[in-house]
Amino acid sequence: VQLVESGGGSVQAGGSLKLSCAGSGFTFSNCKMAWFRQAPGKVRELVSTISTDDIMYYADSVKGRFAISRDNAKNTLYLTMNSLKTEDTAVYSCAACRSWTGYVYWGQGTQVTVSS
């Protein structure tokens, strides 16, 4: 099983980035997917989730600015991030397949840095 994130980078405040997470080795379409982030010195936080029937959840801190989507044909999860703020700076990781103990599969993460 692999989850490979891409699309991170450095951007000025107010800018946009689109993260991708390519999955393999599991049935992508059968799994709830999520984006998490962890800033230096802070606990990991849930950013957004998307269910198998495209029900979406967003943390209050990103609502209205971020959009999660999935392409089951490409086994890929996306996070479109607009109006980025310095406080969005973090390592963003995707996770797949929610179980009663948490998400089963995790990507390695991609750095997003937002400068003022």
Image (spheres, rainbow, N blue to C red):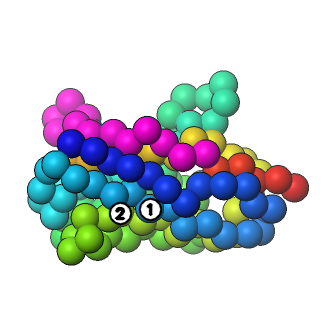
Residue contact between numbered discs 2 and 1, judged by CB atoms under 8 Å: yes
Q: Is residue 77 above or below residue 9?
A: below
Quadrant location of the N terminus? top left
Check the image and name the residue furthest to the right. 116
> Looking at the image, which residue is at 25% across and 64% down?
75
Q: Amino acid at mark 1?
A: Ser
SS label for mark 2: strand
Instruction: Report crowding for label 1: few under 14, some 14 to 19, many 20 or more residues within 10 A (C-alpha).
Output: many
Q: Nearer the viewer, residue 96 or 74?
A: 74
- Give coordinates of residue 7: x percent, y percent: 55, 60
Q: Residue furthest top?
A: 41
Q: Is residue 103 magenta?
A: yes
Which of the image's four quarters has the C terminus? Answer: bottom right
Magenta segment: 98-111
Residue 58 is one of the magenta-drawn residues:
no
Amino acid type shown at disc 2: Leu
Which residue in the structure is indicated by mark 1? 20
Q: Earlier in the sequence, mark 2 or mark 1?
A: 1
| Vertical side of 104 occupied by 58: above or below | below
Characterize the local packing of mark 2: few (<14), some (14-19) or many (20 or more) Cα atoms within 10 angstroms. Answer: many
User: Residue 44, which numbered label?
Assistant: none
21 horizontally vs 19: left or right: left
| Residue labelled with disc 2 | 77
Q: How many angstroms separate mark 2 from mark 1 (CA)?
A: 6 Å
